[in-house]
Amino acid sequence: MGLYDRYLALRYRLHEADPPEHVAVVITERDLLEQGAYDTLADFLTWAFEYGARRVTVSVSVLDEAVVPTLSRELRTVDSPEPIDVRGPGDTERADAPVRISIGLGGKREFASAVRRIAESVEAGELDPEDVDADRIEERLVFDDEPDLLIKTGAERLSDFLIWQSVYSELYFTDVNWRDFRRRDYLRAVLDYKNRQRRFGR
């Protein structure tokens, strides 16, 4: 760890605010084509748990769903300090592992699938329309937890990611590209989070 990284780590330890328990990061299919991209992801997961996270969600946006099987196979083998669940387009089984990876399962698609299953339950007489509320929707989401901190590398824009879950998340944008993302960049994001006063929409 370099001197500047040590300085940021010291600031992290001395800061009284709690770190984010659930960290999410948005990366792209193109990011994973860069040399060392999977090593960066392994490092990211290590840093997240080292600095207080209990859950990490990784969203990989894709342009061509044909690459999903290959990405899924590669991502399942990432050197992670915690177990990994990987979900892709068409998956409805909830991801419960400490590390959860979404490949091409956009927020719009996930939300539409949840609503469709609610409609099927209503049609089958298993659910009263009056009982349809936010909790019923969340029960049917593949990724149900709300991230405390959502990190987007490379640009100040979000892709189709966790539309429902991230409504109260703290968003952190960095112009550092994924291939260049380092411990210091992660610590900057966490320190920025610690300095914020969360309002949860209030």
Image: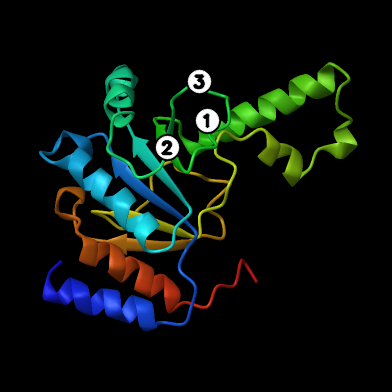
**Marks 2 and 3, how far apart in space?**
22 Å
Q: What's the amino acid at mark 1?
A: Arg
Q: On the rendered image, what quadrant is the N terminus found in?
A: bottom left
Q: What's the amino acid at mark 3?
A: Gly
Q: Residue at x 41, y 82 (%)?
A: 15
Q: Earlier in the sequence, mark 3 or mark 1?
A: 3
Q: What's the amino acid at mark 2?
A: Pro
Mark number displayed over residue 83? 2
Question: Relative to 75, does residue 197 appear above or below in the rendering?
Answer: below
Mark number displayed over residue 99? none
**Marks 3 and 1, how far apart in space?**
9 Å
**Could you classify mark 3 by the number of other residues whose Cα lies within 10 Å: few (under 14), some (14-19), or many (20 or more)?**
few
Q: Residue at x 60, y 42 (%)?
A: 144
| Residue linked to disc 3 | 90
In this rendering, which labeled residue sits more in front, label 1 or label 2? 2
Q: Earlier in the sequence, mark 1 or mark 2?
A: 2
Question: Relative to 161, does residue 115 appear above or below in the rendering?
Answer: above
In this rendering, which labeled residue sits more in front, label 3 or label 1? 3
Q: On the rendered image, what quadrant is the C terminus found in?
A: bottom right
In the image, residue 30 lies at what x, y percent?
A: 21, 36
In the image, residue 65 lies at what x, y percent?
A: 34, 21
